[in-house]
Image: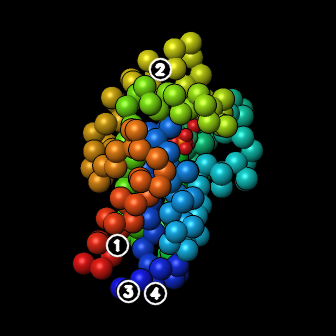
Amino acid sequence: MGPTALGSPFVDNIVLTGFMGTGKTSVGRELGTRLRMEFVDTDEIIESRHGPIDRIFAEHGEQAFRRFERDVASELGQRKGLVIATGGRMLLDPVNLDDLTRNGRVFCLVATPEEAHRRITTDEIGSERPLLGGDDPQRRIAELMAERSDGYSRFPQIDTDHRDVATVADEIVRLWLAAETA
Ligand code: S3P
């Protein structure tokens, strides 16, 4: 595949996973612009259909949210040419993983618990992450990261600590082009 195929509906999707606060949405948006591929964010799709995530959790429970994630994974798995930022647990569900790897290549963004916490508390949707709603979000982040580390470790790891969005995007473009042209 040559560079002329960028932005084509025939290239594999780029799928970003990783813990909350690792920069999936910002990096995904940057990749979409650079590669002229459509960018989608699974949380945004769910919110556009069902309302704010914190309200879904509060009114219908986490299981309902996870079912909405499965619907989105199944739909996006049938498309190509997308950059997809996924919710932090989406690809830890084997059904979603199957759906999104059919036409997609996954990269996992990584940050320390301290850095993830800093980003979550300064980004615009910090208050909408119901899993971090207790009195000690930083401890909760460390616990959840530890629980999920095996699941995330199966994907190529992209360090995001002390690196800006452009630098992280550069690394992913390099890896993705190398894989797509191999
Ligand atoms: C979640 C991550 C969130 C969102 C929901 C649950 C998780 O997405 O899907 O609050 O379980 O890790 P981001 O990773 O985009 O914050």
Percent of width and height locating residue 83: 51, 64
Which residue is labeled 3 in the image? 2
Which residue is labeled 2 in the image? 138
Report the Cα–Cα distance between label 2 and label 1. Answer: 36 Å
Residue at image location 72% in from the left, 34% down from the top: 55
Residue 155 as seen in the image, left or right of residue 168 = left
Dot 3 falls on a residue whose secondary structure is loop
Give residue 177's mark. Answer: 1
Report the Cα–Cα distance between label 4 and label 2. Answer: 44 Å
Q: Nearer the viewer, residue 89 or 83?
A: 83
The image shows residue 171, relative to residue 2, as above or below, that is: above
Percent of width and height locating residue 102: 39, 69
Work out whether mark 4 precedes mark 2 in sequence or the reverse, and give the earlier one. Answer: 4
Which residue is labeled 4 in the image? 4
Give neighbour class at mark 2: few <14, some 14-19, many 20+ (Cα, 10 Å). some
Q: Are marks 3 and 4 in contact (CB under 8 Å)?
A: yes
Give neighbour class at mark 3: few <14, some 14-19, many 20+ (Cα, 10 Å). few
Percent of width and height locating residue 67: 57, 48
Report the Cα–Cα distance between label 2 and label 3. Answer: 44 Å
The image shows residue 27, relative to residue 162, as above or below, that is: below
Residue at image location 27% in from the left, 50% down from the top: 154
Residue at image location 55% in from the left, 74% down from the top: 36
The image shows residue 181, relative to residue 72, as above or below, that is: below
